[in-house]
Amino acid sequence: MTDIVSPVQGVVVSKAPERRDIGLKRRYAAERRFRAYGIAAISFGLIFLAILLTSIISKGYTAFQQTAITLPIEFSEKVLDPNNKRAADPSVLVAANYPVLIRDAMIKALNLNASSRPDVRDATAMVSKGAPIQLRDMVVADPSLIGKTVNVTLLADANIDSANKGQIDLKVDEKNRKVNDKQLGWMNQLAESGALHKKFNTGLFVNGNSSRPEAAGLGVALIGSLYLMLIVLVLALPIGVAASIYLEEFAPKNKLTDLIEVNINNLAAVPSIVYGLLGLAVFINFAGLPRSASLVGGLVLTLMTLPTIIIATRAALRAVPPSIRAAALGLGASKMQMVFHHVLPLAMPGILTGTIIGLAHALGETAPLLLIGMVAFVANAPATPMEPSTALPVQVYMWANEAERAFVERTSGAIIVLLLFLIVMNFGAILLRRRFERRW
Amino acid sequence: MNMLTEAAVEKAVDQKMNTIPYKMIGQDVSVYYGEKRALFDVKLNIRENTVTALIGPSGCGKSTFLRSLNRMNDTIDNCRVTGKITLDGEDIYDPDIDVVELRARVGMVFQKPNPFPKTIYENVAYGPRIHGLARSKADMDQIVELSLQRAGLWNEVKDRVHEAGTGLSGGQQQRLCIARAVAVSPEVILMDEPCSALDPIATAKVEELIHELRENYTIVIVTHSMQQAARVSQRTAMFHLGNLVEENDTDKMFTNPDDPRTQDYIMGRFG
């Protein structure tokens, strides 16, 4: 470029000096490399998330459907109350032989030979062993049913449910299968007549735990988790926020408060099982609170969540511009007024985000609950937080340990419910954040 | 010789302004930030209904002195003030003095406009509300309107007092902060470089405002602008390295200062 070519006629343009190479190419290459690393890292994470979600959903979505058999049940007086004593002694109805009703109904529905005992046994086994209890509850609630024939929808046995969902490998030898060929034939027969069908699995959300997979549900775990969340929210949020406000705004800055701060940060990193041990020692052994109760679980999770909330709240308080504090103090606001009128409202979005992250963390926590006995088999919904209960993640853990095929899909189903809970909570956090930020 | 000059200066000053009483008196005021000493025995009196400008190079302690007048230094950890500062003859560092009440009497306007993230109305009404100055909603409306008028902002915002105060321009925000300070009816208003974040037009408005406010309030203003000090103040105090170099009538200070350092600073030879 020795020739100076002027773009404008008649104007002399200065000559570009020789410039040292300032490594532009290298710098841009470095930036491009860095971006590529970033994209790679994110894709890596997304791929695993996708794998996780697909695996859980593909395994778990079937848990939300359940096979049921609708049979015309004849509430025969001969079976239930042969001596006609129910008016005098209602307990007769409780102790009556309900399985016979189901057996008879199956024999009728499948046109079986009543004297062929193996056939009758296999056919009856297609209905859940919980079905007689369902019938009993119906009759006890309404004794006028006796003598009538009513269409009742009963749960199918878990193995039939699995077979109906196509989860049983039919190439396996019949002897090694939980469902034999005869049962499969009957199943198809019932399905064709419309008696056997799939329905939405409300039991999954309502029932307590059960050793029969078809009757096992998350009801107790949901209530337990709800109690846990309420207790953590009610205890950890006010205590955590109050502690942070005191430490951040009022406490003198000295060795002691430094020590406290370091310890709070350390507590946030303490393995959660240690909190479980602490809860066992303090709340159950020392304070004498009941084992397996969601109250104790809530207290333990509160201890575990507090550091998270305190750290988030202090960060949020610290992020409030000092000019706002100065403005309030300069007007003659007391420190308390400054904090509650100006600093806290501005810190609210951060505090809420921290709290909900802490809650979500607590919702998914299993280890400390195992130690305080919330891993118990609980079939009945707890009416108060003092009664034995489980929690969602513990239920997942318990079902994952079960051997039956039908528990596999329930485990994944429970995980889906847990994830939905978390998504709802995070969504709530975002909404709250928006709301508070709108108020400036 | 030195003693004699000081005495002579004081005498001259007293002769000129002796009719005006002292609102605040600072005696041997020293301020320490931890080990570091920021102010050295400053002796500076503030006259009532007068604008006193504090000038000096950065880090000379003028803001520190200003902040000790309403004890805003209390909010800084390990900050210590010695000496004596009085307001109407009362020692403001006396343990019996309530700092909240003091700050209601000695208001402050800061360097950067710092309105609360609330409406214009709420910004102005906040001070009167916490001090219980308004008995009714109508009372409060009146206080807000009057304060905004005093700050020369009323005409610009009267149709949108319920909109965000942070949505105003920088100059308007600063005047809103002045209105907010005025709303609690302070006796003294401290201004810490109130125009340093404003453009010349907004600055002119604020300066005009300071002129008007002087009738009702005692004003102490820290400024980096010599011109501003000359325009708005009647008295000027020059600080250097934590010492009070000279305090004088503004006219005299900018024409014939007693101390050569003042002369040098005003002429732009250092600082």
Image (cartoon, rainbow, N blue to C red):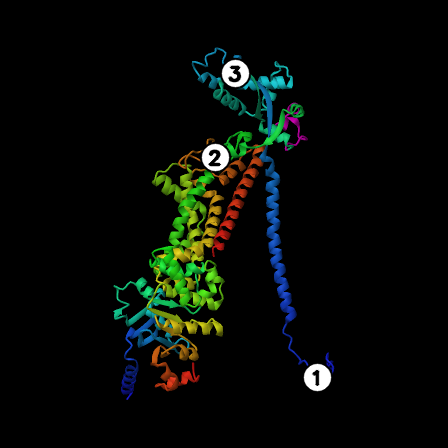
Q: Residue A366 at what x, y percent from top left?
A: 48, 42
Name which residue type carries label 3.
Ile
Q: SS at mark 3?
A: loop
Tag shown at residue A146: 3
For this rendering, which residue is in front, A114 or B194? Answer: B194
What is the quadrant of the N terminus of chain A in the image? bottom right
Disc 3 and disc 1 on one polypeptide chain? yes
Q: Residue A191 at what x, y percent from top left?
A: 65, 26
Q: Are marks 3 and 1 in contact (CB under 8 Å)?
A: no
Q: Residue A251 at what x, y percent from top left?
A: 35, 58
Report in which chain the residue with disc 1 lies.
A
Q: Residue furthest top?
A: A83
Report in which chain the residue with disc 2 lies.
A
Q: Earlier in the sequence, mark 3 or mark 1?
A: 1
Instruction: Give the quarter of the image for residue A405.
Output: top right
The answer for how far apart the CA atoms under marks 2 and 3 are is: 33 Å
Q: Is residue A119 above or below residue B128?
A: above
Q: SS at mark 1?
A: loop
Residue at horizontal 49%, vertical 51%?
Answer: A435
Q: SS at mark 2?
A: helix
Instruction: Give the quarter of the image for residue B129.
Output: bottom left
Q: Which residues are magenta?
A: A167-183
Q: Earlier in the sequence, mark 1 or mark 2?
A: 1
Q: Is residue B33 visible?
A: no
Residue at label 1? A12
Tag shown at residue A220: 2
Mark 3 Cα-neighbour bin, 10 Å: few <14, some 14–19, many ≥20: some
